[in-house]
Amino acid sequence: MQADVLLERVFQRMITANKDNSNDHMNFDTWEWPVGVALYGLFKYNRINKQDHHLTFMTDWFDRHLDKGLPSKNVNTVAPLLTLAHLYELKHRESYLQVCLEWTEWIMKEMPRTEEGGLQHMTILDANDRQLWDDTLFMTVLFLAKMAQITGRQDLQEEAEYQFLLHIKYLYDTQTGLWYHGWNFIGRHAYSKSLWARGNCWFTASVVEFIEISGVQGSVKRYLLETLQAQVEKLQELQEPDGMWHTLLTDRSSYVEASATAGFGFGILKGIRLGYLPARYAEAGRQALQAVVDRIGEDGTVADVSYGTAIGHSNDHYKAIPVCPTAYGQALTIMLLTEALKR
């Protein structure tokens, strides 16, 4: 089946899910990170197909939520603003810009920080005091990078670059090239040192977006790309014959997981297309694409996606996370399929 047909099917399943209140990670009527990722996937899809109804859906969604009032500020509620900033460039609506500027100032001046100035992964449920999580790069730092380009502010550019470097410093596992889920400055530890797949994919997907959005050059770009290639080298080794990766990357007794596979596939294929990665990784990207396509149901639901996952103190924590449809599972699949269309 053609990628554009699958894209529309996955998209339609995602936007009708707000009627299903039994699963908040598939509910499209909440201003939170799962929908933030979903909106960005939809925006990337729209830049290819140029369908008016997709653009109208996004602007209507934002207008409705802006009129209603936004929730409290945290890492995860920043996530939808990445798409809003892109829509501002298309629509030039002053109200969009003002919201983005307000939240940018909060990130720069008020958002809680860890030691060394890291963005603390605070959420609506928990302050996560002095904790760095790899999720933050996609949920908050990409928005900061986009606002640097919109405003021309060098301080935003430098802050976004610094956050990538600092997260690499504490979350990168030098033995494998993979990433830990988080780091806690209280006790100075990486919890169970679990190499969780979706956490890893937040880096794979975000770093290729970051380099493209920010236009970063020189030694910082080189450092980011070397870190990405080290990760992908290990991912290629760990990929299952059917193209999937396990939710604990180095533990084959853990279940295979589709959202991470989609994020890896997207980052690998985009990295190759933009010249960030060598072409020898193309087969891993193509296998990931096929594996995710094989998990798209007739109604557009992406199967084998794990539910939202806080940091665990043991590998068993990650193995016990249930599998169910989620907005971010749909969205990462859309991002992967859009990359397939570009190729």
Image (cartoon, helix red, strand yellow):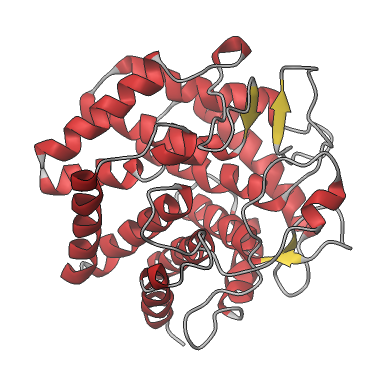
- Residue 9 lies, with reference to residue 183, above or below; the image says below
The x, y position of residue 94, in whole percent, is 10, 36
Identify the image quadrant of residue 126. top right
Quadrant position of the C terminus in the picture: bottom left
Q: Residue placed at 34% from the left, 42% from the top?
A: 82
Q: Which of these two is toward me, 304 or 320? A: 320
In the rendering, at what x and y percent does residue 227 appear? 65, 35
Task: Residue at 38%, 17% (x, y): give it.
Answer: 108
Q: Nearer the viewer, residue 306 or 125?
A: 125
Q: Is residue 1 visible?
A: yes
Q: Residue at x 45, y 72 (%)?
A: 20
Q: Residue at x 25, y 49 (%)?
A: 65
Numbered disc total: 0
Residue 143 pos. (x, y %): 37, 35
Question: Between 128 and 179, which is closer to the camera in this rendering?
Answer: 128
Tell which residue pokes out farthest to the top in this image.
116
Residue 173 relative to residue 343: left or right: right
Judge whether residue 214 can be spotted in this image: no
In the image: residue 96, left or right of residue 231: left
